[in-house]
């Protein structure tokens, strides 16, 4: 028989997961591919955008807010706005991913597709992303 996390234990586990491993820092990036995120994905499975203004945004561990109940912990980060600059045009942002890096190694932590893909105008534009992480009972 498997052990069951109490909600308060699940909250602590979720908080610890997002405090990140020593030497690694978390960051958010928009992605241009329309691939659903899978457990077997690695950092290079998805295509980070190259549009100006779409670079890595550091995520401070202290800025996550947590809620827990019913065997699910949800962590939500404040809205991150990407202000894309002008470019040749024709690119769409389909999702986002959170990576971990120690300056040499990059790892895919988690990601999601946007509810509505964002076709970035050639003159640039803004996209707001609210990263949300779910940690469910095993």
Image (cartoon, rainbow, N blue to C red):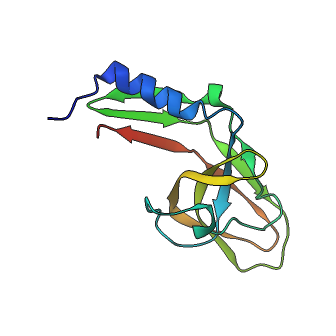
Q: Residue 110 in the image: state x and y as whole percent.
A: 52, 51
Residue drawn at 69 percent across, 65 percent down: 48
- Residue 43, located in which quarter of the rendered image? bottom right
| Picture layout, residue 67 above or below residue 86 | above
Side of 65 where 87 appears, left or right: right
Given the current orientation, which residue lies at the most extreme left position?
Answer: 1
Is residue 20 rendered to the left or right of residue 90? left
Which residue is painted at 82% across and 70% down in the image?
Answer: 123
Residue 109 placement (x, y as % from top left): 56, 49
Task: In this rendered view, identify the residue nearer to me: 107 or 88.
Answer: 107
* Residue sitting at x 58%, y 69%: 45
| Residue 92, image quadrant | bottom right
Q: Quadrant of the C terminus?
A: top left
Q: Is residue 117 left or right of residue 47?
A: left
**Vertical relation: 23 (above or below) 81:** above
Horizontal side of 115 relative to 99 (left or right) equals left
Total of numbered circles in the picture? 0
Which residue is painted at 29% across and 37% down in the image?
137
As rendered, which of 137 and 93 lies closer to the eye?
137
Which percent across, then down, holds residue 89? 77, 78
Give the percent coordinates (x, y) of residue 112.
50, 56
Q: Quadrant of the N terminus?
A: top left
Q: Is residue 106 above or below residue 117?
A: above
């Amino acid at each position: 028989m498997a052990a069951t996390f109490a909600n308060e234990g699940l909250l602590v586990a979720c908080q610890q997961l997002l405090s990140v491993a020593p030497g690694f820092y978390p960051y958010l990036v928009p992605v241009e591919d329309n691939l659903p995120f899978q457990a077997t994905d690695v950092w290079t499975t998805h295509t980070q955008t190259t549009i100006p203004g779409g670079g890595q945004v550091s995520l401070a561990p202290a800025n996550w807010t947590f809620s827990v109940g019913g065997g699910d912990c949800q962590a939500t980060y404040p809205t991150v706005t990407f202000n894309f600059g002008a470019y040749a045009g024709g690119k769409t942002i389909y999702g986002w991913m959170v990576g971990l890096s120690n300056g040499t190694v990059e790892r895919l932590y988690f990601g999601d597709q946007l509810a509505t893909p964002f076709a970035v105008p050639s003159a640039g534009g803004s996209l707001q992303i609210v990263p949300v992480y779910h940690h469910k009972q095993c």
